[in-house]
Structure formats: C-alpha cells, structure tokens
Image (cartoon, grey):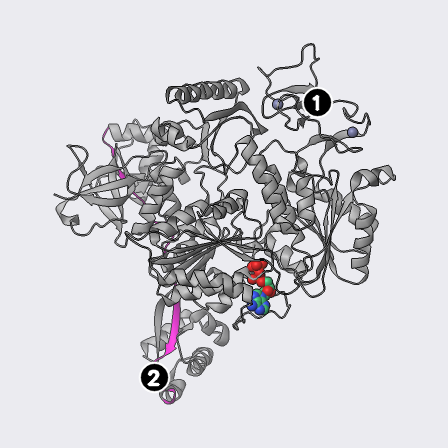
C-alpha cells in the first residue's frame, strides 16, 4: 500500500497527516498535487508532500480525489515551504498557502439536498424558515451552504437546516466547490475558404437586404484578415452579430473557434514614458564597473551548485542609485534563460518601479510575467498557470512573486533588497529577501541582492563572507551625486522664520519653478507619530531610565500598571517610554536650554501642499501619499501626471523613495529629515538613513543636474551627516558600532512576540506571563547570552481597538530556543492575540 504525507489546508495547523491511496488513485498522485481528504467531519484540501511506505499512524483514511492533475507546487517550493516553516516559526500550511493559486485556496462547503427526490416534500409542521429551505431545494436542486446563504440574508437558516438533516428530510455532505476562477475563452472567427469562393458566395448569403449587407461585410472583413480574429472585432467592423457568423460557419465559409486567452495584466499597464531617450530595447555597452560586477555573476551560472556541491553564496550588488544595477539584472537574466532556466526579479512594488519593468519587457518580449498587487484573481491565476507550464521566462513582482511555480529557477534578484516591503507586515511574517536566499540555495540558483543602501545586516554579511559584494560606485548618466545642502532649522527659528520651509528651500523652489523644472518635497510618513522636542536646541525629551525618546500621547495609554510619577495628577497628555513604560508630564520648558519652544512635532502632507500653494500660487502641486493612493491604479495616474509635467511640485511620503527615475526633477526638498530618527526603535537610524539616501537619489538623475535641500533640527546627528555627504560607509561603520555595543543585529538575532487584546489589562497580563515563561526557559537552558526586551507596550500602543504589548527575545539563536520548547507552530499561533516575528525590522 502507498501512503501520502499531506499538508492539509487548515489554517493554524502545522502538522502533516498520512492518508492511504485508494486503488483508483495509485500512480496518479505525485508530490505537489492538490487533493481532497477527509479531515474530522469535513472535506478539506491538502497538498501531497511525499509518498511514503510506512504511515506515522496505524489507521489511515483514504485520499478522496485529485483537484488538479498537475502538481500545484514544485518540489523546490515544497522544500521552501518547509524551510520557511522552520525559520520563521510558522506552520507549513501557512507557507503553502502563500504558494497556492488564488481561487484554489478556498475552504470546503456543505451541500444540501432533499432526501426523497421524487416526492413533493410534506411541509406541514415545519417552521417558516424550514419551509423556505425545502421549497428552495425542491426548486433548485442540491445547493451549497454559500448558495443558500444568498437567499437568507440576515436570517438564521443553519439551525433550521440542521434540524431538517436530523429528521432525515435533507441530506448533507462536505464538498469542495470548484475553483472560482476559470480559464477565459474568447470566440474567434477565421475565413475557411479561398477569397474567390467567398466572393462568389456573397449574393446568396441572406434573404433580406439588411442580412445580406451584414453578412457580406463580415465576410469581406475576414477576407482581409489572415488569422483568427476576435468576433468582437468582426461585430465592430461589420455590424454583424453572432447569429450571422453562425450562419456563415454553417455554410462552411468561416470557422468559429473558442480560443483560450491568457489574462494578460500587461495589457493594462501603461508605463509612463520618461522620454529621456534612454535605450530600452537595444543593448548597452557595459561600463567597466558594470563589466567587473557582472563577471562573477555570469561565472556562477557555469558552475552548477546542486546536490553535494557547496552552494553559491548570494551576491550583494551595492551600487548608488543610477549606477546601472538594472542592466546587471538584465544580463544575468539573459544568461539564466540561455541555460534554459527561469528568473525571478523581485521589486518593492511594480507601480513604483515602472522603468525597471519596462526595461525587462523590452528585453524579453512575450516572456515576462508580472505579479501585481492589483491584478484580478483571474489574471493572477493565469500568470500562475503560465509559469507552471514553463511559458514564462522572467517573473517580476513584489514579494509574492517569489512563490510563482517556475519549473527550473536559475536566478533570483532582489532589487532594493533593504526595502521594508519585502517583509510581510501581517502573519505569516516572513522576509522575502531572506526567503529568496534560501530558495536560491534550494534550487541551485544564482541570487543577486541589489541596493544603494543595503541593510546593516546585509552589508555586514558581505564583510564576513556570507555573501559576495560587488560594487558600482558611480552614477552612469550624471556621475556627480547631487549636492545636499543641510539647513539648520533652529537657526531658521532664531531668525524669525516659523514656517515649514527655510529661506533656502523657498529660494530653491522659486528658482526651479521659474525655469520650468520640477521639484519633489519629501515628508517622512512617520511624521504623524509625535515626539516632543525643543525647537530651539533640537533636544528630544528622553526617558531617564533607558534614554529612549518619550512619545506624546493626547489620551492616556493603557497605563494600568505602568509606573506613574508619585503624586502626578491624572493628565490628558503625557509622555510615555515605549521601551520601559516610564511616564511623565509634558514639560513646559526645555530641560537643556530652558526655552519654551518645546512641543510635539507632527506634520501632514496636506499642510505642506497648502503652504506651497500659499507661497507660489501659480505652482501646480500634486500630492502622493497614503490618502491619495487608496484608489486603484492611483500610483500610475499620479506618476503619469508628474512625468508628463502636468504638475510642478510633487509632495509625497515614502513612495518617493523607491527607485523612480524622474529626469525633470532638479530639486528635492526634505521637509524635516529628523522625523523618524527619534523613534524608540533600534532600526530607526537605519530606516531614516535609507529613506534620506533614496530620496536624495531622485534629484539630478538627468543631465539637467540637481540639488537637495535637507532641513533638520539635529544637523549634527550622524545619520544626517552621513546622508548629506552621500556617505554610506560612514553611516555603516558608526551604526555597526552602535549595534555592537548594544547587542542588536547583526550581533544578535531577535524574535518579537506581540500580544494584542481588546482589554488593556489582559494584553499586559498575557505579555507578562509570556515573558515569565521565556525567562524561565532561558534560565533552565542556561542561555546566558539570551535576554528579553520588555514586556512593554508597543509604540503604536493601540491598533484597530486592540492594545499592543510586546516581548522581544534576543540572543545568538532565540528562534532555536522557541523551536526547542515548541513555542512554535500551533501552540504559538493557536492564540489569536500572539504574533511571532523572526528577524523583525521594527520594534514599534
Ligand atoms: P540603478 O538600477 O542602479 O538605479 P539603472 O540601471 O536604472 O541604475 O541605470 C541608470 C541609467 O543609466 C538608466 O537610464 C540606464 O538606461 C543607464 N545605463 C545603464 N547602464 C548603462 C550603460 N552601460 N551605458 C549607458 N547607459 C546606461
Ligand atoms: Zn532646548
Ligand atoms: Zn524608558
């Protein structure tokens, strides 16, 4: 007997289960296929992981059926799902779920039908709801729960139905509804005879002149078209209808076909043309820097690394913005395809990287699949299937594109590999950049991580040999990086300017508008988070116990058991330390310089826009922030407007920092660079440096040149200093020292555990008891280098009505401890309120 080890698709279940194969399915089931199996009293989906001869349990149930004869997962994907479950402390099912095509992932349903089919059921003695159910089923035949639901909006019908099942009037069984998305077909028409024959047939095509005219026109049109033509075109061109075409087909003058079409998302993407005259389709001659960087990557394709051979470590392509990294990716992809393999190119977001996408499309026409967060389910399904059939050579997309089932992956590129969007912010937490490395290892593929500002950890790994660093030190088009002028906003204030813009920035804006160029004004999104600082000397109010900046709260946070200064009155606004829970009242004067200019800081992009309009009434402004991008395709629309120069000033938040190439932009204004710097998070400096470096990189990308004005209340801060001199190395060495001293990554690993609860007291209690448990494990295992941060309320202490607390486990191998103590899988994820994140990128 053959048994199948199956990961069942039941959320929050980490295990695999063994089933036996009934004779009729033997030989048909191979690893990776999607099957239906009984699970408890339900029928659920599951993916076959492997076939085994010895089951884990003595009694097995049979596999019910196969949902799709082709495997839904490749062997490499199964291996990746396993690796992810182990590394990110999540369930195997969660990983597999990321890889399953949309529409296949839905849950089983129950189907109901009348037991006595041929009799009209007796409805005497039934309740009104029961009567309606019986009438519905006798009229419509068997129906699924979800279908019945539609007829009983806001009516409790399930109980009624259950009673009917008990009395035997209805029968029920678990079924798995078919996928909601199906391949899309179009009807096409084609001339079936010699044009001369068609011409001769014209006079006898119909009885009325109108029919004759329509059918004649349709035939004429098809005589001119050599191939299959969408009937919609024929209708449009000739005014005919389907009946006409069917008549022509009956006369054997034309053939009608149903042709399956791939839903192609590229048909919708209109990528704004930058018009900078850049070469897209043609081959560029590599610069010597590019050639040097590309060489070892191409070499890696020559030496396969599968099986017992040592794997290749990833490449870290460290090159400033505009240094030609994309061209390296393209060449690597060409080499990959030459070896008969496929490439995955991960980008932070398709809509924000239209240039990269366009260049790939131009180089690999007809071979590129796009994964896009705004694809319809059907489009996703088609892309998924085309990939599975080996029809796509290159897949481009955000983190989910990693999970497209390509049969033989030879290259995985992670562009802007430092970008936060590679980390899924909701469970199941994972980092696509980390997973990409592991996947490349499992596939024997070449992995290239590219960035102008690799994360501290990524860069450090290249220093210690965990990756091979390749550098592109110079921009290609305009080798001089744009000068960054730092404006000290404290001086500005002293000279009487209380506005958002410094004199320098106002002058620069005026200049740019005068010569009809464009400007970008960047605002850190985290600007809405408010910390309190002195506008006179720049001091941020910090916690006396842990030196973390205190955060301003207008309404009291959940401070049930938090330490309150003795004798402090109940206050509506107070400052809270999100690291240790310390609270104090908002001071009226600066503790350092005594100035009364101490206040919380928060600034929205509407305010900035209003200020630009006030100062420059004729300037055309465009806002690009969370609020203006909620609409579908808003990114494309806004970007399209700006590149077409229908606006002069683009005011935006984080999206501006993602690799856009806007040639007319000659001024970048950073409204307040230090926002985000003072957040109570060990990764705050790194995030701020990245965003400043990336935003500055938007200026002067063309031969027009450009400049950056950076406004700051803390110009002496090392992040501001390093960012303003385009000095990644300076930032890196300073930040690495800080991490080393405080034991943060890369000198430790972290696992963040967050508790959410509707009641403040409960959230706190659970966090404390979790911390106690962790402490006792650390002690019992004698893990002296492992420590806890917290428990403490999270910085964003309330989210969607839930209170958030966290405990961070830090040490050489915190995930290992949790795995050992099996605080993983179901136990861990069983509690809805507990979220476990390995390698968090933020402790807010
Ligand atoms: P990055 O990806 O590092 O930001 P890009 O690949 O976008 O840099 O390159 C920046 C610009 O330089 C693009 O306009 C690109 O077309 C151009 N470019 C890249 N490589 C070359 C080359 N070898 N010769 C000429 N232009 C190049
Ligand atoms: Zn001060
Ligand atoms: Zn503190």
Q: From which residue to which does the magenta span run?
A: 167-196
Q: Is residue 667 visible?
A: yes
Please name the residue that numbered disc 2 is placed on. Answer: 193
Residue 190 forms part of the magenta stretch: yes
Which quadrant of the structure image shows residue 40? top left
Q: Return the residue nearer the eye: 528 or 138.
A: 528
Numbered tag placed on residue 156 in the rendering? none
Q: Is mark 1 within 8 Å of ligand 3?
A: no
Q: Residue at left 72%, top 62%? A: 705
Give the residue at x 46% y 47%. 433
Q: Is residue 459 left or right of residue 343?
A: right
Look at discs 1 and 2 and give the one toward the viewer. Answer: 1
Q: Is residue 843 visible?
A: no
Q: Residues within 10 Å of mark 1 (few under 14, many from 20)?
A: some
Specify the quarter for ligand 3.
Answer: top right
Residue under the point 45% across and 38% down: 429
Residue 489 inside the magenta-drawn segment: no
From this view, report whether residue 576 is shown above or below residue 362. Answer: above
Residue 505 picture location, percent across and down: 79, 49
Report the residue marked by disc 1. Answer: 573
Q: Left or right? Give the position of 54 relative to 811.
A: left
Q: Is residue 326 above or below residue 214?
A: above
Residues at marks 1 and 2, CA–CA distance in whole angstroms: 84 Å
Q: Secondary structure at mark 1?
A: loop
Q: Position of residue 585 (x, y in %)?
A: 71, 20
Q: Dot 2, crowdedness within 10 Å: few (<14), some or many (≥20)?
A: some
Depth order, front residue of 387/701: 701
Quadrant occupied by the C terminus: top right
Residue 114 x/y as whole percent: 25, 38
**Left or right placement of residue 306 versus residue 379 in this view:** left
Q: Quadrant of the N terminus?
A: top left
Whichever of labels 1 and 2 marks the residue nearer the N terminus, that label is: 2
């Amino acid at each position: 007997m053959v048994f199948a080890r199956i990961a069942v698709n039941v959320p929050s279940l980490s295990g695999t289960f063994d089933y036996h194969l009934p004779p009729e399915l033997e030989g048909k089931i191979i690893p990776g296929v999607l099957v239906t199996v009984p699970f408890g009293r339900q029928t659920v989906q599951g993916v076959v992981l492997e076939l085994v001869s010895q089951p884990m349990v003595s009694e097995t149930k049979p596999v019910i059926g196969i949902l799709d004869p082709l495997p839904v997962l490749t062997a490499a994907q199964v291996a990746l799902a396993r690796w992810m479950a182990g590394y990110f402390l999540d369930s195997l099912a969660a990983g597999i779920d990321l890889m399953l095509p949309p529409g296949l992932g839905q849950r089983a349903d129950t189907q109901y039908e009348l037991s006595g089919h041929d009799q009209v059921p007796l409805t005497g003695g039934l309740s009104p709801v029961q009567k309606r159910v019986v009438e519905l089923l006798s009229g419509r035949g068997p129906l699924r729960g979800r279908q019945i639901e539609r007829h009983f909006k806001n009516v409790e019908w399930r109980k009624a139905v259950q009673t009917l099942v008990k009395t035997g009037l209805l029968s029920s069984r678990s079924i798995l509804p078919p996928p909601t998305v199906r391949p899309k077909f179009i009807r096409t028409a084609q001339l079936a005879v010699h044009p001369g024959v068609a011409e001769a047939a014209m006079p006898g095509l119909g009885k009325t002149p109108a029919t004759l005219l329509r059918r004649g026109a349709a035939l004429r049109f098809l005589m001119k078209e050599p191939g299959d033509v969408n009937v919609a075109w024929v209708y449009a061109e000739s005014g005919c209808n389907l009946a006409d075409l069917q008549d022509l087909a009956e006369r054997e003058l034309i053939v009608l076909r149903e042709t399956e079409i791939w839903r192609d998302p590229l048909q919708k993407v209109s990528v704004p043309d930058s018009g900078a005259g850049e070469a897209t389709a043609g081959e560029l001659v590599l610069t010597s820097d590019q050639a040097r960087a590309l060489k070892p990557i191409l070499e890696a394709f020559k030496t396969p690394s599968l099986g017992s051979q040592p794997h290749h470590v990833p490449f870290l392509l460290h090159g400033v913005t505009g240094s030609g990294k994309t061209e390296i990716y393209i060449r690597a992809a060409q080499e990959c395809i030459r070896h008969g393999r496929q490439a995955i190119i991960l980008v932070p977001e398709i809509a924000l990287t239209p240039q990269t996408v366009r260049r790939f499309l131009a180089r690999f026409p007809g071979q590129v699949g796009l994964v896009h967060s705004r694809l319809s389910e059907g489009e996703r399904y088609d892309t998924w299937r085309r990939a599975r059939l080996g029809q796509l050579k290159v897949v481009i997309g955000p983190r989910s594109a990693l999970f497209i089932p390509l049969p033989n992956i030879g290259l995985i590129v992670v562009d802007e590999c430092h970008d936060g969007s590679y980390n899924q912010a909701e469970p199941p937490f994972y980092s696509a950049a980390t997973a990409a490395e592991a996947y490349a290892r499992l596939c024997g593929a070449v992995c290239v991580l590219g960035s102008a500002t690799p994360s501290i950890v990524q860069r450090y790994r290249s220093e210690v040999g965990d990756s091979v660093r390749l550098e592109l030190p110079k921009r290609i088009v305009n080798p001089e990086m744009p000068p960054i002028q730092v404006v000290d906003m404290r001086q500005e204030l002293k000279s009487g300017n209380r506005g958002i813009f410094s004199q320098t920035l106002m002058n620069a804006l005026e200049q740019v508008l005068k010569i009809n160029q464009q400007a970008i004004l960047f605002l850190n999104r985290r600007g809405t988070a408010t910390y309190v600082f002195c506008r006179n000397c720049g001091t941020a109010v910090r916690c006396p116990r842990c030196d973390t900046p205190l955060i301003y709260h207008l309404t009291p946070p959940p401070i049930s058991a938090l330490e309150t200064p003795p004798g402090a009155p109940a206050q509506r606004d107070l400052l809270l330390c999100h690291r240790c829970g310390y609270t104090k009242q908002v001071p009226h004067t600066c503790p350092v310089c005594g100035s009364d200019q101490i206040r919380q800081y928060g600034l929205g992009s509407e305010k900035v826009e209003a200020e630009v309009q006030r100062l420059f009434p004729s300037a055309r402004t465009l806002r690009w922030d969370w609020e203006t991008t909620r609409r579908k395709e808003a990114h494309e629309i806004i970007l399209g407007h700006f590149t077409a120069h229908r606006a002069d000033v683009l005011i935006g938040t984080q999206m501006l920092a993602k690799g856009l190439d806007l040639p007319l932009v000659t001024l970048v204004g950073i409204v307040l660079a230090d926002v985000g710097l003072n957040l109570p998070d060990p990764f705050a400096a790194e995030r701020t440096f990245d965003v400043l470096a990336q935003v500055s990189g938007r200026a002067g990308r063309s031969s027009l040149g450009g400049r950056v004005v950076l406004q700051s209340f803390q110009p002496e801060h090392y992040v501001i200093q390093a960012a303003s001199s385009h000095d990644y190395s300076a930032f890196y060495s300073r930040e690495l020292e800080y991490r080393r001293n405080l034991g943060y990554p890369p000198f430790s690993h972290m696992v963040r555990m967050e508790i959410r609860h509707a009641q403040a007291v409960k959230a706190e209690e659970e966090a404390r008891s979790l911390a106690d448990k962790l402490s006792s494990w650390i002690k019992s295992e004698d893990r002296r280098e492992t420590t806890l941060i917290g428990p403490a309320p999270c910085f964003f202490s309330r989210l969607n009505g839930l209170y958030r607390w966290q405990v961070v486990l830090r040490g050489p191998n915190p995930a290992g401890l949790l795995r050992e103590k099996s605080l993983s899988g179901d136990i861990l994820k069983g509690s809805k309120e507990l979220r476990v994140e390995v390698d968090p990128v933020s402790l807010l």
